[in-house]
Amino acid sequence: MSWIKRNLAFVISLAVALTLLIGGAVYLFSAQSDAEAANGELEAKKNEYDTLVKREPYPNTKNIDLAKAEQVRFAELKAQSLTTFSQYSSVGTLDDASFKALLTRTIGDLERSAERKGVKLPSGSDGGSGASSKYNFTFSTQRRELRLAPNTLQPLALALTDIREFSEILFASKIHSLQHIKRSAIGTNELAGSGDILSKKVGTNTVIGAGIHPYEVQFQCFSSELGEVLTRFVGASNAYVLKTVNVDRPSGDGSDSAEAAPANPAAGMMAMMSRYGLRPGMGTMPPASQPNAAAATPSGKVGDIVLEQKPIRVTLGFEVVRLALPPASTQAPKATRR
C-alpha cells in the first residue's frame, strides 16, 4: 500500500490506460462488424448491378429508344381497341317519376317488338297475390315500389338499356320463346342469387377504365335461330363477351330433363337408327323385338319424316363491357331559363 501511495499518479494513469485499451478493443470489434456488414451490402449491390448489366436487353440508348417506340405503339393499339367497346350512355338527371316513365315505355316497346316477331314472353307475378301478369324484364321490384333510392337510378337505367338492346337482338333472331333474363343486383332491396338476380356482381377493369356487367338469358329456338343470335351478338355495336353456352333438349313430355334411354338396349339402338334413316341390316346391330322394330323403323315411303328437329333450350351467360365517359361528358346539361 505504501508503494501505491508513493506511485499514486502512476497507478491512476495505468488504470486510465487500461480502461482506454478495453474501450478501444470494444470499438474496434464494433467497427469491424459494421465494416463486414457494409462489405456484404456492397457485394450484394455489386451482384445486382452485374445482373442488370448482363441482362438482355441492355439499357443502352438504342434499347431505350426502342422501348419508347413500343410505348407509343401500345398507346395507339389501346386507343384503336377501345373503339370496339361502347360507352356509358348519358341519361341525364333522373328521379322516381322520370325513371318509372322510362321503365314503362321501354317495357311496352319490348312487348310490342316481341309480339311483332312472334316471340312468346314469360308470365310475370304480382308478388304476394301470385296472379299472372306481364313480364317486367327483371324490374318487377322497381315497378312495385313507390320510392327508389336515388343512387340506384343511374345503374338501373343502364341495366334497362342493356336489356333492351340484347332483347332486340333476340327478337330480331326470331327465337320461339324467352324463358328468363337475369342481371346483377342493384341496391340493397335485391337479393343476389334469387329470382331474376344473379349472384355475380358488376366488375371493373382499371386498365381501360371499363365496367363489366354480367347477364344471363334463357330462350327456346332451333339451331338456325341460335346461329342467328350468336351472329348478331358478334356484329353488335356493344361489346358482348360470351362466357357460357348451355344447350338442352327438352323431353317429349314437356319436362326440362333430357330424353331418357329405353330399358331395352336393342330397342334404343333401333330408335337411334330410325332417327337417321337407317334400317336393320345396314350395320352390325343386335336383333330387336318385332313390335319395337316396326314402331321405330320408317316405312321408306315418300313423305315420311325421317329426322324431326325439336326446339332446344339455350342459356347464354355473357358480359357487357362499357367504357366510362370523360369527366366533362358525365355532367348533365343545365337547363336554360327564358
Image: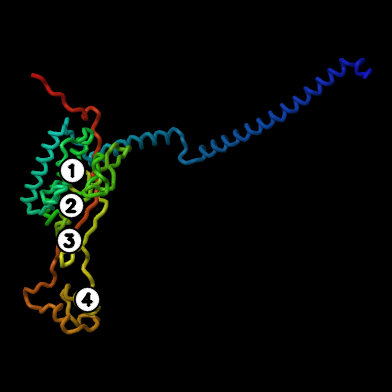
Hey, which quadrant is residue 292 in on the image? bottom left
Mark 3, secondary structure of its residue? strand
Q: In which quarter of the image is the C terminus?
A: top left
Report, in whole angstroms, how far the alpha carbon at label 3 lies from the one at label 2: 15 Å
Q: Residue at x 22, y 64 (%)?
A: 257
| Residue 100 visible (yes or no) | yes
Question: Which residue is labeled 2 in the image?
Answer: 180
Residue 215 horizontal/vertical position (percent)? 23, 47
User: Could you tell which of marks 4 and 1 lies nearer the N-terminus?
Assistant: 1
Q: What residue type is labelled 2?
A: His
The 10 Å Cα crowd at callout 3, few under 14, some 14 to 19, many 20 or more, is some
Of tags 4 and 2, the one toward the viewer is 2
Callouts 4 and 2 close, C-beta under 8 Å: no
Question: Which residue is labeled 1 in the image?
Answer: 141
Q: In which quarter of the image is the N terminus?
A: top right
Spot the residue most to the right.
2
Report, in whole angstroms, how far the alpha carbon at label 4 lies from the one at label 3: 21 Å
Of tags 1 and 3, the one toward the viewer is 1
108 in relation to 24, above or below: below
Q: Which mark is residue 312?
A: 3
